[in-house]
Image: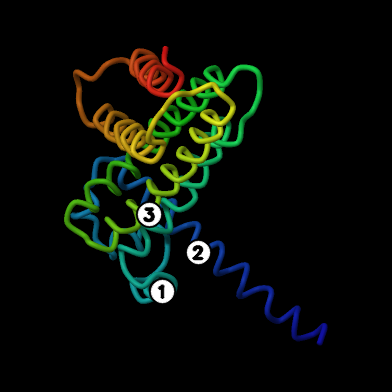
Amino acid sequence: MATESRRESPPTARRVAIQAAVLRATEELLAEGVSFADLGIERIATRAGISRTAFYFYFADKRELLLRLTDEVNGLLFEQADRWFSGGGQDPEGELGTALANIAALFREHAVLLRALVEVSAYDGQVATFWRSTIVRFVDAGERRIEEERAAGRSAVADARATAYALTWMTERALYQQLVESDAPSPEDLVGALAGIWACSIYGG
């Protein structure tokens, strides 16, 4: 049994390394200005140092590649949002502001990837479903926190679900537009505006 385990390890390590190389190559090409629609498998494979055939051994298609890339980023985004979702300290508005600032920073850090994801979701049903399910996770968590704030007497929101839905999608659209518009507000100004809107909506100013 020990021998079998040793034999299985190298292929597993190689698989992880190749997948990481493909993901890194894709991000690099997107950062260089290649649109995801124009990004061919051959180009990705060449940059990653593998053959086109090898690419299909690890990824079914470009869609799976994009979803795999963004899955980790989504985890990082939720981790920051959870500062407020699971908070309970003496400064909930401060927690909210910190969470929004960190989420905005992640949007900028992974701008090329998130731009590609949102743009592809406009014409690819599976990618759209994936992105909507990601946003719904934030809406669900936001709804729970608003209900907790209401139960604690810190919020008078009548409809926690609708409020969480509106605020979450507003934030997603605003952060995305900042990535694609040259005349968008500065990151600091946008985060300040978003934090103010969230605070006023939930805590009444």
Q: Are marks 1 and 2 in contact (CB under 8 Å)?
A: yes
Disc 1/disc 3 C-alpha distance (Å): 30 Å
Looking at this view, name the residue that lies furthest to the right. 2
Q: Which residue is mark 2?
A: 18
Q: Nearer the viewer, mark 3 or mark 2?
A: 3
- Residue placed most toward the observer, 72 or 29: 72
Q: Secondary structure at mark 3?
A: helix
- Residue placed most toward the observer, 69 or 139: 139
Residue 67, above or below 73: below
- Residue placed most toward the observer, 102 or 148: 148
For the residue carrying disc 3, how many other residues have a C-alpha within 10 Å: few (<14), some (14-19), or many (20+)? few
Q: Which residue is mark 3?
A: 133
Q: Are marks 1 and 3 in contact (CB under 8 Å)?
A: no
**Amino acid at dot 1:** Ala
Q: Secondary structure at mark 2?
A: helix
Which comes before the other along the chain, label 3 or label 2?
A: 2
Report x, y in % for residue 97.
49, 20
Which comes before the other along the chain, label 1 or label 2?
A: 2
Report x, y in % for residue 192.
39, 14
Report x, y in % for residue 8.
68, 79
